[in-house]
Amino acid sequence: MNKVFWITFFLLSSLIVNGQEEQSNSFVGKWNVEIKGTPGGDSKMEVTIITKDGKLQGTVTSKDDGTVAIKKIENKNNSIVVYFKHGWFTVNLVMERIDANHCKCKLADRYNGQSSRQGLKNP
């Protein structure tokens, strides 16, 4: 009985870990992000997310800041939060999945936008 419990526990644990890994890996790639209505006008950036040593990392490229490293990425249920340096500040970009190739975005908890994997049109 005890062995059955432990075998079941380890199997379920591995399924949960694999599911979380798949979900975060689904954001890997290059994303064209467009944010509407920022103080400097509509903002376009490219967010590149890779997996290195089992963790999500990457860069954000914009006209104003050039290419900057992502400082941190947090996994949420169906979204990720990307933290990066913009000017003197660290800002966050929430990318919430619409489908496999499109996300709703929110920059600095204030400005709404959308993103699509590079090579696709925005929804």
Image (cartoon, rainbow, N blue to C red):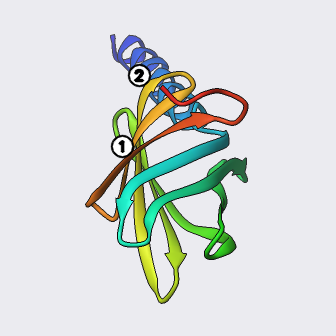
Please tell me whether mark 2 or mark 1 is closer to you in this view. Answer: 1
Taking the image as shown, residue 1 lies to the left or right of residue 20, namely left
- Identified at 57% across, 25% down, the residue is 101
For marks 2 and 1, the one nearer the N-term is: 2
- Identified at 73% across, 31% down, the residue is 119
**In the rendered image, the vertical position of residue 41 relative to residue 87, given as above or below:** above
The residue indicated by pointer 2 is: 6
Residue contact at pointers 2 and 1, CB within 8 angstroms: no
Residue type (three-letter) at the residue carrying disc 1: Lys
List the single residue furthest toward the front.
41
**Mark 2 Cα shell of 10 Å, populated few (<14), some (14-19), many (≥20):** few
Tag of residue 42 = none
List the single residue furthest toward the left.
110
Front one among 54 and 11 = 54
Residue 86 % position (x, y): 51, 77
In the figure, residue 69 lies in which quadrant?
A: bottom right
**In the rendered image, the vertical position of residue 43 relative to residue 22, given as above or below:** below
Q: How many marks?
A: 2
Front one among 16 and 103 = 103
**Mark 1 Cα shell of 10 Å, populated few (<14), some (14-19), many (≥20):** some
**In the rendered image, the vertical position of residue 50 relative to residue 58, given as above or below:** above
Indicate the quadrant containing the N terminus: top left, top right, bottom left or bottom right. Answer: top left
Residue 22 % position (x, y): 56, 28
Residue 32 % position (x, y): 61, 44
Residue type (three-letter) at the residue carrying disc 2: Trp
The residue indicated by pointer 1 is: 76
Residue 102 % position (x, y): 51, 29
**In the rendered image, the vertical position of residue 8 relative to residue 113, given as above or below:** above
Q: Secondary structure at mark 2?
A: helix
Q: Secondary structure at mark 1?
A: loop
What's the CA distance linking mark 2 and mark 1? Answer: 28 Å
- Identified at 41% across, 15% down, the residue is 8
